[in-house]
Image (cartoon, rainbow, N blue to C red):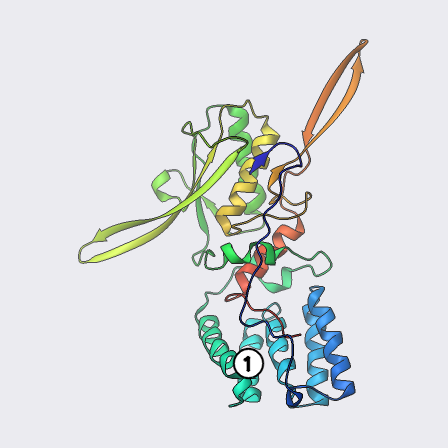
């Protein structure tokens, strides 16, 4: 997380995917009614209304059983509703595409996708697609390039908070943990070696304008004849500034978001994963003397933050809907 003015520009990642198809051969298109239902489904999809999109894709398919693009997008929308339904829908897409040369690459890609989905771990309730709030949306495409493959597969994640040099920082860190623990399966541990995510309170030079930092590595150990690997995430905070408790809460909450899998930033200031810690400055007069106050604007994950995390954990890799 950075601190400072709004002049810092958020770097936007453009996801380039071979799966993006902008035109289809005539045999993949439906009649007028099917095309209308298909266009409606695509609009629902882009609005994050995945359940409604599924119904419209099904309508398009009922109007034209050979509508390959509709099968594809139906499966992609189903990934955000129910995994089993999505796997079945992908298999229907493979059948519909058959041995058509123009879909040869897509069929191979989807066969691999289905295999990944069948091996994905069962997700905790907090990450189920049913918790996705369509009206709010997400910023999945902003973070997908760096975040995919960074999801955790064991739950609950164990978190070591350590001992902060100031009590107000310790309180802020604990509040940040409690905020995420209400949304994501986490467990506090007493020793650093037990933690999957660990807070480091050692003095660290994080560079100009960086309030906090999250870094990861893999810890390899040999046990008998076997080599084991464990993923570790460490959060550090710039201790050269006398952060208020609410500041520390915002910093740790943001860095925990990175540790949970969001390896990027939101493009909206109301999200905890926005790249800067926002401050609101206002003035009052007391006893004839002007006083200036400020407060952090965001202290906890927004529904967009939560939606993005849910979408990340329910996707077995990037794929863009057919146009």
Disc 1 marks which residue?
Answer: 88
- All told, the count of numbered labels is 1
10 Å crowding of disc 1: few (<14), some (14-19), many (20+): few
Percent position (x, y) of residue 41? 72, 74
**Is 58 placed left or right of 209 in the picture?**
right
**Is 151 placed left or right of 129 in the picture?**
left
Q: Nearer the viewer, residue 273 or 166?
A: 273
Q: Secondary structure at mark 1?
A: helix
Relative to 319, does residue 237 appear above or below in the rendering? above
Percent position (x, y) of residue 73? 63, 76
Percent position (x, y) of residue 119? 43, 70
- Tell me the residue at 55%/81% (across/down): 88
Q: Nearer the viewer, residue 117 or 112?
A: 112
- Tell me the residue at 61%/75% (across/down): 21
Quadrant occupied by the N terminus: top right
Can you see residue 157? Answer: yes
**Is 240 placed left or right of 132 in the picture?**
left
Can you see residue 125? Answer: no
């Amino acid at each position: 997380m950075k601190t400072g003015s709004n002049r810092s520009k958020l770097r936007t990642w453009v996801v380039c995917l071979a799966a993006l198809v902008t035109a289809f051969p005539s045999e993949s298109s439906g009649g007028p009614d099917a095309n209308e239902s298909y266009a409606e489904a695509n609009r629902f999809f882009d609005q994050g209304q995945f359940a409604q999109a599924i119904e419209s894709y099904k309508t398009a398919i009922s109007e034209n059983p050979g509508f390959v693009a509709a099968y594809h997008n139906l499966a992609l929308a189903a990934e955000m509703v129910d995994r089993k339904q999505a796997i079945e829908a992908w298999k229907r897409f493979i059948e519909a595409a058959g041995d058509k040369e123009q879909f040869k690459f897509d069929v191979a890609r989807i066969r691999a996708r289905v295999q990944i989905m069948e091996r994905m771990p069962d997700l905790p309730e907090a990450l189920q697609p049913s918790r996705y709030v369509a009206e709010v949306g997400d910023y999945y495409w902003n973070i997908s390039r760096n975040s995919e493959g960074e999801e955790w597969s064991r739950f609950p994640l164990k978190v070591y908070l350590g001992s902060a040099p100031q009590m107000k920082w310790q309180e802020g860190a604990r509040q940040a943990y409690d905020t995420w623990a209400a949304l994501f399966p986490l467990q506090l541990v007493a020793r650093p070696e037990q933690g999957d995510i660990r807070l480091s309170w050692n003095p660290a030079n994080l560079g100009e304008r960086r309030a906090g930092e999250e870094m990861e590595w893999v810890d390899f150990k040999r046990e008998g004849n076997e080599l084991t690997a464990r993923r570790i995430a460490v959060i550090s905070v710039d201790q050269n500034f006398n952060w208020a408790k609410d500041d520390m809460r915002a910093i740790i909450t943001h860095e925990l978001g990175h540790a949970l899998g969001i390896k990027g930033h939101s493009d909206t200031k109301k999200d905890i994963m926005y790249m800067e810690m926002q401050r609101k400055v206002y003035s009052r007069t007391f006893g004839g003397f002007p006083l200036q106050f400020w407060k952090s604007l965001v202290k906890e994950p927004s529904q967009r933050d939560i939606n993005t995390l849910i979408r990340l954990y329910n996707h077995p890799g990037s794929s863009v809907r057919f146009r």
